Image (cartoon, rainbow, N blue to C red):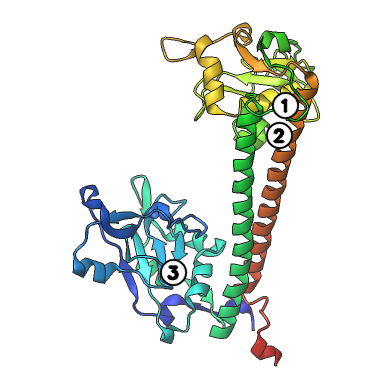
Amino acid sequence: MSPLKQHKKIGDQISSGFQNGIYKHADEYSDDGTCIIRINDYGNDGTKRFECLRRVRLSASEIDRFSLKRNDILINRVNSLSHIGKSCIVEKLEDTTVFESNMMRLRLTKSSGISPEYLFIVLNSVRVRDYLRKVAKPAVAQASINQEDIMSLAAYLPSLQQQTAIASLIFTWDLAIEKNEQLIEAKWRQLNALTQNLLTGNKRIKGYVEKWRKYRLSEVLTEHREVSSGYEEVYSVSVHKGLINQVEHLGRVFAAKDTSNYNLVKPGDVVYTKSPTGDFPYGIVKQSRIDFSVIVSPLYGVFTARSQQLGTFLNFYFESPVRTANYLLPIIQKGAKNTINITNTTFLSNSLYLPSCDEETEAIAAILTTARQEIDLLKKQAEAYRRQKRGLMQRLLTGEWRVMTSKENS
């Protein structure tokens, strides 16, 4: 029998168990009330952030009606289309906890023949999330689903024993992903501490004692003014990705038809774009870590550093919004329409404390680069885990693959 023929509607297995959450005005939130789960307290992949829940004043009857229990499933019913249908499963709660009105609770009974953990995995599958987005009712800036939309879902429902085995296997992958993410966060904290100490001279590398001195950037960066040869790809500059192909970053090329005056960026060059973005209102500074030459808009400043390692040092230095603002704010002029007026010469006119010894600059750049590479490798590992989990879910949730249980082995 085809696995697809074994799919059953959730509504054929359950007839009740749904409850929409409680609405309370902002004035009723209080430091000494009952814990309440809000829509931002769990992610689009079901990950929970229940450590710092808000509290709200409730009556005894409201607490009784909206309190959560272990294995309750919360489903986002009102939100933007990209977040509609996101869900989480309730595990151990330290305090009495309720849930707000833009989500629904589903509490399964033993007679339903559906494992809560298994249904949670089904609800977070790509197929079901896509289905819920299709049936969602659109409204201004948001969409909604209801209990009937969940009841209409068709899912592969093997025996409870097989459901439990599948859920256990998927949760094992989730645990590996979670531990990987925790390690990435720890590595980021370590890198942030290193940059704060090493890039300011607060902490010196053993063996280097020569006093740092103030350098104008014009002393260590040179604008080479080379332009496109006509064969280079057009790149943009991103806060998180650095120099990146425009098609990859923006979906298409936004360059002019004639790019002959576009600035050439060689490997290791430092690029300054004055375009404000996010936490960088005066622009961003990045070193090209691409191993071939590209071109960028003539509005960007492109500079060659005194050494490759100094360029890396400056790249890490300007990754901080605070350090970037401290450097740029004194030399920036804003136009009538809040535009940023700064020439490439002016960009080079301010000063930074830098190592006097090139070897110390190289050592600092090496330490920070190694720390960043460790993070990049962990990110790739996390993405590999996610891909493998998606492939595993695709096969397990259609019945294409089964999990061998101890009972079946005996």
Which badge, 2 or 3, comes first in the chain's sequence?
Answer: 3
159 lies above or below 371: below
Residue corresponding to mark 1: 312
Give the residue type that dot 3 points to.
Answer: Lys
Which badge, 2 or 1, comes first in the chain's sequence?
Answer: 1
x 60%, y 75%: residue = 166
Q: CB under 8 Å between callouts 2 and 1?
A: yes
User: Looking at the rendered structure, which numbered label has been put on residue 92?
Assistant: 3
Q: Is residue 205 visible?
A: yes
- How far separated are the C-alphas under marks 2 and 1? 9 Å
Under tag 2, what secondary structure? helix
Give the residue type that dot 2 points to.
Answer: Leu
Furthest residue toward bottom: 410
Count of marks, rendered view: 3
Residue corresponding to mark 2: 368
x 80%, y 23%: residue = 359
